[in-house]
Image (cartoon, rainbow, N blue to C red):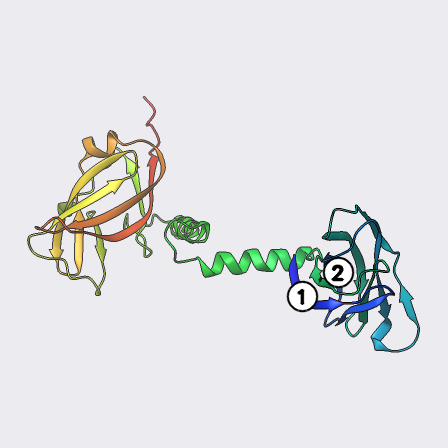
């Protein structure tokens, strides 16, 4: 719901129907019109109605009348809301009428757009939000992008009749390893992350944290590169599944810098026949 217009009038005479607001539609809307009155004399019926003129020309059509009974001791009231569908260019006028003694009342008219968005507009808004938050850690957009990168990395393993090898760290920084395998530098299988924007200090500790699973100590390879070696025993002890993980630099003074965040995939290798 969006507020399109507010019209405020003071010291008005509403003994006879008084024009209290005029609105020209700028698009196709479903309008909700609220009329509130203050300083009323009370003890009678108060009314409001709206008229619509298509494209601002030709016949003028009146809406059903909204009415409320005000007690003698009450000086303010909110008339039942008026609802009206309009097209762009239509002119809407709102009128109010009170009692014979209502010669100095205040009137506020609020016109709202309560149009229900089309499904295509809702889908576009959701997609826009996802793409805006695509780089925000913890957002659904970031998760989808990371997971798609993981799937794409798996698709790259499919060859035409020949075996293919790949690094356990994807281009986006995610990890995909096999439970029970070793990932050692001597075998050319060490997990490595590189970013030319980093400045990893010589004395810093490198922590690889798999959420709710395990913490490992990595190695500073250079100011812009870090690595992690895992033995067969270490990977065999890990839980199968997909988990969030981060690589963090912990400086000598205790300052902590998150260098990488992503998805850690642990899969199970086939069991050989015996």
Nearest to the observer: residue 37 or residue 265: 37
Across and down, in percent, residue 71 comes to 79, 45
Across and down, in percent, residue 80 comes to 78, 51
Compared with residue 273, is residue 99 higher up or lower down, i.e. above or below? below
The answer to whether residue 53 shows anywhere in this view is: yes
Res. 239 image quadrant? top left
160 relative to 264 in the view: left or right: right
Residue for point 67% across, 66% down: 6
Res. 184 image quadrant? top left
24 relative to 165 in the view: left or right: right
**Residue contact at pointers 1 and 2, CB within 8 angstroms:** yes
Residue for point 10% across, 57% down: 201
Across and down, in percent, residue 13 comes to 80, 67
Figure quadrant of the C terminus: top left
Per the model, the C-alpha gap separating discs 1 and 2 is 9 Å
Q: In this figure, which residue is indicated by the disc labeled 1?
A: 4
Q: In this figure, which residue is indicated by the disc labeled 2?
A: 31
Q: Residues within 10 Å of mark 1 (few under 14, many from 20)?
A: few
């Amino acid at each position: 719901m969006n507020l399109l217009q507010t019209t405020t009038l003071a010291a008005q005479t509403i003994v006879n129907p008084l024009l209290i607001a005029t609105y020209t539609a700028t698009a196709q809307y479903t309008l909700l019109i609220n009329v509130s009155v203050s300083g009323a004399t009370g003890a009678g019926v108060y009314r409001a109605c709206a008229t619509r003129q298509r494209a601002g020309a030709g016949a003028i059509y009146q809406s059903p009348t909204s009415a409320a009974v005000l007690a003698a001791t009450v000086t303010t009231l909110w008339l039942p809301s008026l609802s009206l569908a309009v097209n762009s260019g239509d002119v809407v006028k709102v009128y109010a009428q009170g009692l014979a003694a209502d010669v100095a009342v205040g009137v506020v008219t609020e016109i709202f757009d309560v149009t229900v968005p089309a499904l295509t507009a809702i889908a576009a808004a959701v997609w826009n939000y996802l793409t805006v938050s695509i780089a925000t850690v913890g957002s659904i957009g970031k998760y989808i992008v990371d997971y798609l990168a993981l799937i794409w990395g798996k698709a790259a393993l499919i060859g035409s009749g020949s075996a293919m090898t790949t690094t356990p760290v994807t281009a986006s920084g995610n990890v995909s390893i096999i439970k029970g395998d070793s990932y050692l530098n001597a075998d050319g299988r060490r997990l490595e992350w590189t970013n030319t924007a980093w400045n990893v200090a010589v004395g810093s500790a490198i922590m690889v944290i798999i959420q709710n699973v395990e913490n490992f100590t990595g190695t500073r390879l250079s100011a812009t590169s870090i690595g992690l070696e895992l033995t067969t025993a270490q990977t065999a002890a890990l839980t199968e599944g997909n988990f969030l993980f981060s690589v963090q630099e912990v400086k000598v003074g205790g300052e902590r810098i998150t260098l990488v965040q992503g998805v850690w995939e642990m899969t199970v290798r086939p069991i050989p026949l015996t």
